Image (cartoon, grey):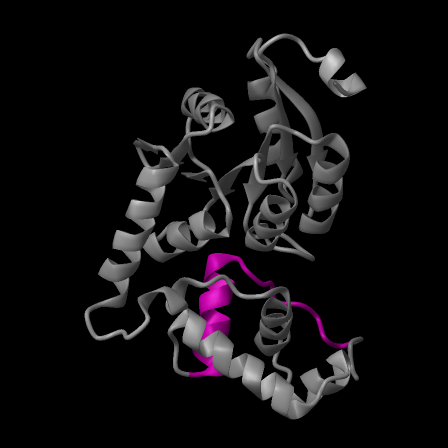
Amino acid sequence: MSDRDEHRPPGSISVLIVDDHPLFRDGLHQALMLEDDIRVVGQSEDGEEGLRSARRLQPDVVLLDINMPHMNGLQVARQLKAERSNIAIIVLTAYHDAAQVLHAMRAGASAYCSKDITPDDLVDIIRDVARGQYVVGNERMDERTLETWMQSSIEAMSGPYIIDAEEHFIPLSPREMEILQFVTNGLSNKEIAVKLRISQQTVKNHMTSILKKLNVEDRTQAAVNALRRGWVRLQDNSNNNP
């Protein structure tokens, strides 16, 4: 048993909050402080810091925004689950559609919630995911039920004419997300290749994969899709010339 476990109150749930809005973070913290069985062990303001904090603090549950600088929430979720499979991740976001929910759950989230959720409902979900349950909307699921739900959701969204429905819901790789950020900020394949020190053909191959995974036809649609979901952010390129 670690020192951290020895000093943990019996039955308590440790929570890390990762969101780039200070007022929202503080509001969550204040609400959770009212619960005897929940302890907020830290706050982080961006994805990279959140990943470092989760590694250091080893929380039971991470409350995670999607739209953040440096690393978005889906990237953080995938990395955390790859490193520690028993961590529970609750995605809190202002953007909601069926595809986004599916992307989040496939990235490793245990629950997907709107940011206008009531404190009482959020506390219930924190307790549920800490016990190993999964929550989508008002539905509580075990792991097997979640797998069935994801498969049926993929088939429903992809339609009967998609040869490999799951390919459209494979999360983007870190390199693909990096390239998509550059595309969103208007860089050409040549400029991206120079920045990443890879060939233009490699960039082109990544773009083909991105378009297929997002089920869009061109770079503009990919950029709009990613911006709307909060996966990337517009940045000032004035001081970022290759």
Q: Is residue 53 left or right of residue 30?
A: right
Task: Identify the residue at image location x=62%, y=41%.
Answer: 19
Task: Identify the residue at image location x=29%, y=46%.
Answer: 149
Answer whether residue 236 is magenta in the image. Answer: yes
* Residue interval drawn in magenta: 218-238
Tell me: residue 219, above or below residue 46: below
Answer whether residue 222 is magenta in the image. Answer: yes
Residue 70 visible (yes or no) = yes
- Quadrant holding the C terminus: bottom right
The residue closer to the viewer here, 139 or 188, is 139
The residue closer to the viewer here, 87 or 45, is 87
Task: Identify the residue at image location x=44%, y=71%.
Answer: 213
The percent position of residue 131, horizontal first and vertical second, equals 47, 23
Q: Is residue 56 left or right of residue 119?
A: right
Tell me: residue 109, above or below residue 10: below
Quadrant of the rendered image containing residue 231? bottom right
The percent position of residue 227, horizontal first and vertical second, equals 51, 64
Quadrant of the rendered image containing residue 169? bottom left
The percent position of residue 44, horizontal first and vertical second, equals 70, 39
Q: Is residue 162 left or right of residue 142?
A: left
Tell me: residue 126, above or below residue 160: above
- Quadrant holding the N terminus: top right
The percent position of residue 75, horizontal first and vertical second, equals 60, 55
